Image: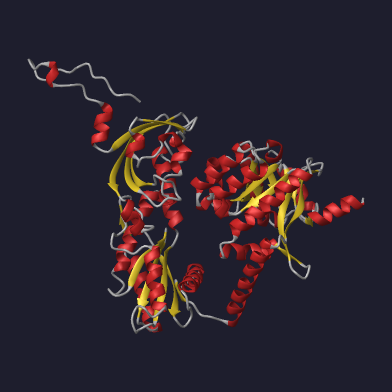
């Protein structure tokens, strides 16, 4: 974009032209701390005004020439809403010029940085005959330099109460209570309040209305606690409360007051009245938790139980011998995972994925196994959930990638599939490791299919879409795992750009028992094929399932009927012996 040239420099009649110099477009933008852009959706290219880098925090604007790159500089809580706000979402009108006015946090140094500025984004998006976005053009204006205050306000979204604690401050207050630095009265509690069905509210009304609901709920909760207690934003739909000097009866009283203050009256938003419900989980301190980390974990368990309860939406953590034994077992497994990673005792088991009709192996899925010191082997379903709970998933993903790449090198005729956890799909380290381990050798990457779980994709669609694009650019194919398990399957297909969908095994496991299951699987297969995607039927256990899936048109089949997972070292030994 260039400076505008206005040949009409005359003012009132008789005024000399020199008294009214030409207006410089960039000068106007600079004066209001704004910049301008044009975004072409077909190429994902963004053209910026000359001052864009300076306005957006001194960033090298050349790094933001693609829409995907720009999205990775938006606060994750706002990214999806921003995209839908610009494009009009899935129900955008055809051949339209859709105006938008948005406000979100821009991160000059990306999501790993700590700086942020609030911006207003105003513009128009043009759609084609199918309602798909073609071009957007508009202005971005910095409305407040919030580098310091963002660090202080943590996860607060637009409209949050400025006086509310963030997660870090809340955790620090919780730690002070437990360490007896908060005063002589160390008895207390930690509560987590969750807005139920926030995803449904976002999908129905839009993310901006979801932000309004969160803000209004926070205001109501603030009125339900005492002044000496601490209330803060814990995460996107969760609020935390640290109660000081209280007993069990008071804990329940506060929790029920919190639920009532949110649920008794509908939330009046800019889109109209929205019905909001709340679930609350609590843990007594220090009786049932001695550290902030333990208190948070047990409050999360309590609130999960409250959310799944058919009646009461309040639950206070109640320790039991079974739960304590499970907790100790999980700690032991987490320790064993770390030792196994250090000792190189993680291994790969291979399960064939066969072509429909002829049942010839097309490729193998790499399934992790853990060799214990006594020589026995632990299945992934025993240790992967623990790894996710203790934040070890990325370490496991990295080791699995190393093993898979080594196998691709030693077996040049094989094709492999590898599952990646939700944490890795939102972290650049995994794709960096893929590039480093393969040396960008496409004879390796083109034989690798990366599987992403549908639940992870739904949780952070924007980041997952960027991950998918990076992986495909490297030469790999991408499969959406557990397809059909989540309500957002159709949207996932539309937004992610994957190559393959793997139909959720729980749907296939019951094939033949209910005709409705067959119809549903048939619909999923037809939907995938309409997008030009291959399909895999998982958990195939009998010949009847094979017949039904092949009749439905599934491209590939996987399950114990065609071969149980087999350790690669055993498979290699058998191959060598033969």
Which of the pair 126/324 is nearer the observer? 324
Q: Report the coloring of the rendering.
A: secondary structure
Residue 334 visible? The answer is: yes
User: In the rendered view of the protein, which quadrant contains the N terminus?
Assistant: top left
Picture quarter containing residue 225? bottom left
The reply, left or right, for residue 353 in relation to residue 43 is: right
Residue 289 on image: x %, y %: 48, 78
Q: Position of residue 208 (x, y in %)?
A: 36, 49
Q: Is residue 172 toward the left or the right of residue 4 in the image?
A: right
Q: Nearer the viewer, residue 500 or 391?
A: 391
Q: How many marks?
A: 0
Residue 483 in percent (x, y) is at: 62, 50
Q: Is residue 533 above or below residue 237?
A: above
313 relative to 160, above or below? below
Q: Position of residue 196 (x, y in %)?
A: 44, 62
Q: Relative to residue 550, is residue 321 drawn left or right? A: left
Tell me where residue 279 sits by quadrant.
bottom left
**Residue farthest along the right direction in this orientation:** 578
Q: Quadrant of residue 55?
A: top left
Q: Residue at x 48, y 80 (%)?
A: 288
Question: For this rendering, which residue is in front, 62 or 130?
Answer: 62
**93 above or below 558?**
above
Q: State whether residue 511 appears in this view.
A: no
Please identify the residue farthest to the left as the structure is shown: 14
Q: Residue at x 69, y 64 (%)?
A: 340
């Amino acid at each position: 974009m260039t400076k505008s040239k206005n040949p009409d420099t005359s003012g009132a009649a008789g005024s000399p032209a020199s008294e009214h110099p030409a207006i410089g477009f960039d000068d106007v933008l600079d004066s209001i701390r704004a910049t301008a852009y044009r975004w072409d959706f077909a190429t994902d290219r963004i053209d910026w005004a000359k001052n864009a880098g300076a306005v957006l925090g001194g960033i090298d604007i050349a790094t933001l020439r693609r829409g995907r790159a720009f999205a990775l500089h938006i606060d994750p809580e706002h990214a999806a809403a921003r995209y839908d706000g610009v494009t009009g979402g899935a129900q955008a009108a055809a051949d339209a010029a859709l105006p938008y006015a948005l406000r979100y946090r821009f991160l000059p140094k990306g999501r790993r940085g700590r700086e942020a500025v609030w911006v207003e984004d105003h513009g128009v998006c043009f759609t084609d005959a199918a309602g798909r976005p073609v071009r957007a053009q508009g202005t971005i204006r910095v409305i407040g330099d919030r580098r310091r205050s963002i660090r202080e306000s943590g996860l607060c979204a637009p409209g949050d109460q400025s006086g509310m604690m963030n997660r870090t401050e809340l955790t620090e207050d919780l730690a002070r209570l437990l360490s007896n630095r908060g005063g002589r009265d160390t008895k207390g509690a930690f509560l987590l309040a969750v807005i139920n069905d926030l995803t449904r509210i976002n999908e129905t009304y839009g993310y901006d209305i979801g932000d309004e609901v969160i803000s209004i709920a926070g205001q109501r909760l603030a009125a339900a606690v005492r002044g000496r207690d601490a209330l803060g934003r814990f995460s996107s739909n969760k609020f935390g409360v640290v109660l000081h000097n209280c007993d069990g009866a008071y804990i329940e009283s506060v929790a029920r007051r919190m639920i009532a203050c949110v649920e008794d009256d509908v939330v009046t938003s800019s889109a109209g009245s929205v019905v909001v419900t709340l679930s609350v989980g609590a843990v007594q301190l220090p009786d049932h938790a001695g550290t902030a980390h333990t208190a948070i974990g047990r409050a999360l368990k309590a609130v999960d139980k409250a959310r799944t309860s058919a009646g009461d939406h309040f639950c206070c953590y109640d320790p039991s011998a079974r739960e304590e034994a499970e907790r100790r077992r999980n700690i032991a497994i987490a320790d064993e995972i770390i030792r196994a990673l250090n000792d190189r005792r993680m291994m790969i088991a291979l399960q064939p994925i066969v072509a429909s009709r002829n049942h010839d192996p097309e490729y193998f899925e790499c399934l992790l196994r853990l060799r214990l010191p006594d020589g026995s082997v632990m299945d992934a379903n025993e240790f992967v959930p623990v790894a996710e709970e203790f934040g070890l998933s990325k370490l496991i993903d990295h080791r699995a990638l190393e093993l898979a790449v080594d196998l691709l090198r030693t077996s040049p005729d094989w094709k492999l599939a590898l599952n990646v956890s939700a944490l890795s799909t939102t972290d650049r380290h995994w794709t960096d490791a893929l590039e480093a381990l393969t040396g960008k050798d496409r004879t390796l990457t083109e034989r690798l299919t990366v599987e992403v779980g549908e639940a992870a994709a739904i949780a952070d669609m924007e980041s997952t879409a960027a991950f998918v694009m990076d992986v495909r650019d490297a030469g790999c194919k991408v499969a959406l795992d557990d397809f059909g398990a989540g309500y957002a399957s159709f949207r996932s297909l539309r937004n992610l750009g994957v190559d393959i969908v793997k139909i959720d095994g729980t749907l296939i496991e019951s094939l033949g028992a209910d005709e409705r299951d067959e119809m549903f699987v048939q619909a999923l297969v037809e939907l995938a094929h309409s997008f030009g995607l291959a399909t895999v039927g998982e958990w195939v256990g009998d010949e009847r399932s094979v017949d039904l899936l092949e009749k439905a048109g599934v491209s590939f089949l996987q399950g114990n009927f065609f071969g149980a997972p087999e350790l690669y070292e055993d498979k290699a030994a058998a191959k060598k012996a033969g």
